Amino acid sequence: MRSVAGEHRYTWLASGTDYFSGILGAVEASQDCICLETYCYTAEDLGKRIRDALVRARLRGVSVRVLLDAVGSRGLPADFWTPLQSAGAEIRWFNPLALQRCWFRDHRKMTVFDRRIAFLGGFNIAAQYEGDGVRTGWRDIGLKIEGPLAGRLANAFEEMYSRADFRHKLLTGLRRTDANKVLTSPDHQLLLSGPGRAASPIKRALRQDLEEASEVQIIMGYFLPTWRLRRHLLRVAGRGGRVQLILAGKSDVWLSRLAGQSLYRRFLNRGVEVYEYLPQILHAKMIVVDDAVYVGSSNLDQRSLQINYELMLRVRDRGLAMGARAIFNDSLTQCRRIEKEQWRASRSLWQRLKQRLAYWLLVRVDPYLARWFWRRLAD
């Protein structure tokens, strides 16, 4: 599904098969530079295929730089990158492990080729993401971008690459504005967020779009929005708009799924349609608000919106939104709808207690600890 908006051409990639095929093809075609940033990279067959393709690119003279989160990619063998480094590529680890910094992670996922082509979305480079998201592989969504935006994404990579060790003086500026900003162009906004005092541009942009929205579709692997975002979603439904949520029927983070389920009742009571995706673990991050589309690395939960470094692209374009809605509607065929009365009857007291405890841990405890560590860094 392709769409042209302004100076850019966008292609939706609604399966790991399509996404990684596109990545590997772009590596082989690259001529100048490659920037790869991801949270999780594993040493399974997929990771080796991409590494070996990067080695071939480097050997033909392409500049290659890789930025990995030190927690998300901690399972890599110590010598995994030796062939690529021996070929002259640069590898950096974001925020090497230390107790006072462990809470703040680089959760962004993007790859940029020759500053002309970029891929972003929710896909980590790991075997569980390969497949169609129905029969095999986790369900995720990505976007291929061709045009000047790829250069802006490369600049965003440069900034994160320069602060990877998480120890330098720039942290003083980060605490207010540097990690949270919006790069605006006539046909898109690049929303960059991170820890600190400044409000998340992802939250701010989404709240503004929801103010007058009439049709909202969200497919989200980890759904625990802030109170203000929940209020805006409920207001859309309250004034007669349609709000549809596809959430995880299966999750790799059971605590997150429990916490999200604690919100079902209030959404169902206000007429929000809630669905759970059943065939595979849901990991997608896509939001459609009328003609505005959001896609990238950020979940709608406290960690993504307040603690992690995240990247979301917002594009207001009818053609791109139609493609996103087609993906959403196709996903609906693999979901079960949560009905209000049935949901209420199915929850025991013990289940409700577990859900409320999970909510308290993720909404209260996790952000509190992150703020405490952030204050320690400021001292």
Image (cartoon, grey):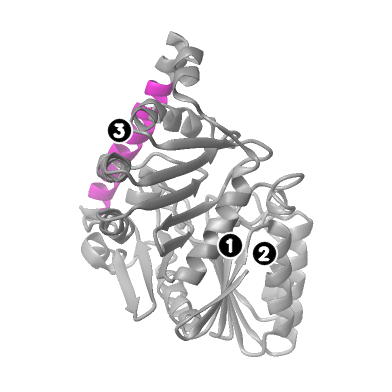
The amino acid type, in three-letter code, at marker 2 is Tyr
Spatial distance from mark 3 to mark 2, Cα to Cα?
Answer: 35 Å
Q: Amino acid at mark 3?
A: Arg
Specify the farthest residue to the top.
349
In this view of the protein, can residue 359 be seen by the observer? Answer: yes
Q: Nearer the viewer, residue 269 or 112?
A: 269
Q: Nearer the viewer, residue 161 or 182?
A: 182
Inspect the image, locate mark 1, and give the three-letter code of the amino acid beneath it.
Gly
Picture residue at 39% right of the left edge, 78% below the top: 187
Mark linked to residue 281: none
Provide the residue designation for mark 1.
Answer: 142
Viewer-side residue, 179 vs 146: 146
- How far apart, in angstroms, are the residues tagged by discs 1 and 2? 7 Å
SS state under label 3 = helix
Q: Name the residue: 35% across, 37% down.
A: 366
Helix, strand or loop at label 2? It is: helix
Q: Which residues are magenta?
A: 355-377
Image marks 1 and 2: residues in contact by CB distance under 8 Å: yes
Task: Kindly report the secondary structure that dominates the magenta region of the rendered protein.
Answer: helix
Tell me where residue 267 appears, x and y as whole percent. Answer: 37, 33
Q: Are marks 3 and 1 in contact (CB under 8 Å)?
A: no
| On-image quarter of the N terminus | bottom right
Instruction: Name the residue beneath numbered marker 2.
Output: 19
Question: Tags 3 and 2 in contact by the CB under 8 Å rule?
Answer: no
Magenta-span inclusion, residue 285: no
User: Is 138 on the left or on the right of 321, as rendered?
Assistant: right
Q: Secondary structure at mark 1?
A: strand
Does 374 lie within the magenta span?
Answer: yes
Query: Which label lies toward us, 3 or 1?
Result: 1
First in sequence, mark 3 or 1: give its number: 1
- Frontmost of labels 3 and 2 is 2
| Residue displayed at 22% across by 58% down | 198
